[in-house]
Amino acid sequence: MRAVAARVTSASVTVDSRVVGAIEAGLLVLLGVHTQDTPEKAVIMARKLHELRILRNEESCATAGAPLLVVSQFTLYGETRKGRRPSWISAARPEQAEPLVGAVVDELRNRGAHVETGEFGAMMEVTSVNDGPFTVLVEI
């Protein structure tokens, strides 16, 4: 599982001209699922994201009570080492990825986090105002 976590002052996801998720002062998480990912990895990713100390004053969403906006993004597993066209062979198919993205979101909520989401499989417009900017890659 791979995530790009960005500290933001605001972020939102729009689908068909309607906002489906939005946060203020928290983490925007673009989440990719690998073909070999498991529900156990989803639990680990949720814990890592919730406790990641990249907010101001080295706080995490867990300590600051900051929200997370989680957006599924299979393109994080696009392989670009050869040629000019990415290969998606490592990205999980939708029937595998959707439940695992849901498992990360569910685990974050079980931990007490406020979580907004995008819409799995939809063409989404993601807007964000990065804070810092401070962005990290989280892999499990």
Image (cartoon, helix red, strand yellow):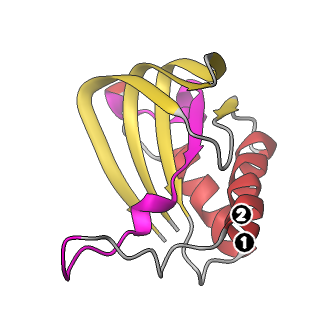
Q: Residue at x 58, y 60 (%)?
A: 45
Disc 2 element: helix
Single out the mark in the foreground, 2 or 1. 1
Looking at the image, residue 98 sits to the left or right of residue 24; the answer is right
Q: Residue 71 has which mark?
A: none
Amino acid type assigned to the residue bearing label 2 in the image: Leu
**90, 6: nearer the viewer:** 90
Q: Residue 96 has which mark?
A: 1
Q: Which residues are magenta?
A: 57-84
In the rendered image, residue 127, in percent from the top left (x then y), is placed at 42, 24
Q: Residue at x 47, y 33 (%)?
A: 27
In the rendered image, residue 43, in percent from the top left (x then y), is placed at 69, 63
| Image-quadrant location for residue 115 | top right
Amino acid type assigned to the residue bearing label 1 in the image: Gln
Query: Which residue position holds label 2?
Result: 100
| Image-quadrant location for residue 96 | bottom right
In the rendered image, residue 134, in percent from the top left (x then y), is placed at 27, 35
Q: Residue at x 71, y 63 (%)?
A: 100
Q: Callout 2: few (<14), some (14-19), or many (20+) C-alpha neighbours within 10 Å?
A: many
Disc 1 element: helix
